[in-house]
């Protein structure tokens, strides 16, 4: 039995992926396990934020943008890594401000874009909130081991991809130092 659609005929029983033209768009933009935006949507939002700050009127104060990459180093050792991802994603959605973008990463577990930050004290406070979330035990009293890398946009001409690459370098430095470390990217 066939149905006529705008773009041709399709047999009944074919999966929703083929029937719904918006399915692929949605699946590319959000992670199915956590419900968080995907890395691709994160990168797009980051570039939009950088463009907004870069092209502000010179008379306006430019805010800092923090890119935080988070890797759960012991994820493969949990019985149910999916439940760990869901629990950590839920914590970040609840405890971080709504205007921050929290996304599911590809190689590294999570990405966070913190916007409208004014100074180093405010950045340190927000990063300590995230670290506290990851130090809290999970529902089954297990602990997450993490590595975090931070890059900072402070008004210079830069692309979103560069900020992400800098955060990745910082994550790798944090991993080299052992568990539960946070590193800021620096050119040195």
Image (cartoon, helix red, strand yellow):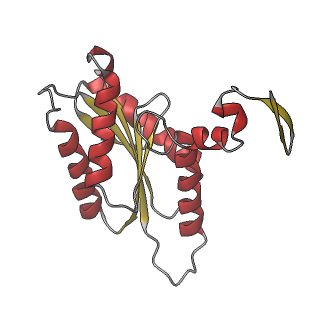
Residue 117 location (% of width, % of height): 36, 65
> How many dots with numbers?
0
Residue 5 location (% of width, % of height): 83, 42
> In this rendering, does residue 46 appear at all?
yes
Q: Is residue 48 left or right of residue 91?
A: right
Residue 116 location (% of width, % of height): 40, 67
Considering every residue shown, the one lying at the far left of the view is 141
Quarter location, residue 71: top left
Quarter location, residue 40: top right
> Foreground residue, 51 or 84?
84
Residue 25 location (% of width, % of height): 65, 43
> In this rendering, does residue 174 appear at all?
no
Considering every residue shown, the one lying at the far front of the view is 1
Residue in the picture at 56% in, 50% down: 160
Quarter in which the C terminus is drawn = top left
Residue in the picture at 70% in, 26% down: 14
Considering every residue shown, the one lying at the far right of the view is 8
> Foreground residue, 45 or 150?
45
Q: Is residue 138 left or right of residue 86?
A: left
Q: Is residue 77 above or below residue 72?
A: above
Quarter location, residue 115: bottom left
> Foreground residue, 73 or 5?
5
Quarter in which the N terminus is drawn = top right
> Foreground residue, 37 or 59?
37
């Amino acid at each position: 039995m066939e149905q006529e659609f705008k773009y041709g005929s399709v047999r009944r029983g074919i999966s929703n992926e083929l029937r719904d033209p918006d399915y692929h768009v949605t699946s590319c933009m959000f992670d199915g396990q956590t419900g968080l935006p995907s890395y691709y949507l994160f990168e797009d939002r980051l570039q939009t934020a950088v463009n907004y700050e870069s092209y502000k009127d010179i008379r306006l104060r430019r805010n800092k943008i923090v890119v935080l990459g988070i890797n759960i180093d012991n994820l493969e050792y949990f019985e149910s890594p999916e439940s760990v991802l869901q629990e950590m994603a839920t914590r970040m959605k609840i405890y971080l401000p709504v205007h921050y973008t929290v996304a599911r990463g590809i190689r590294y577990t999570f990405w966070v874009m913190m916007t409208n930050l004014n100074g180093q004290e405010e950045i340190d406070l927000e990063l300590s909130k995230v670290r506290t979330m990851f130090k809290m035990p999970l529902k089954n009293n297990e602990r997450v081991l993490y590595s975090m890398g931070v890059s900072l946009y402070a008004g210079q001409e830069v692309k979103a991809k560069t900020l992400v690459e800098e955060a990745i370098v910082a994550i790798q430095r944090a991993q080299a130092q052992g568990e539960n470390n946070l590193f800021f990217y620096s050119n040195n």
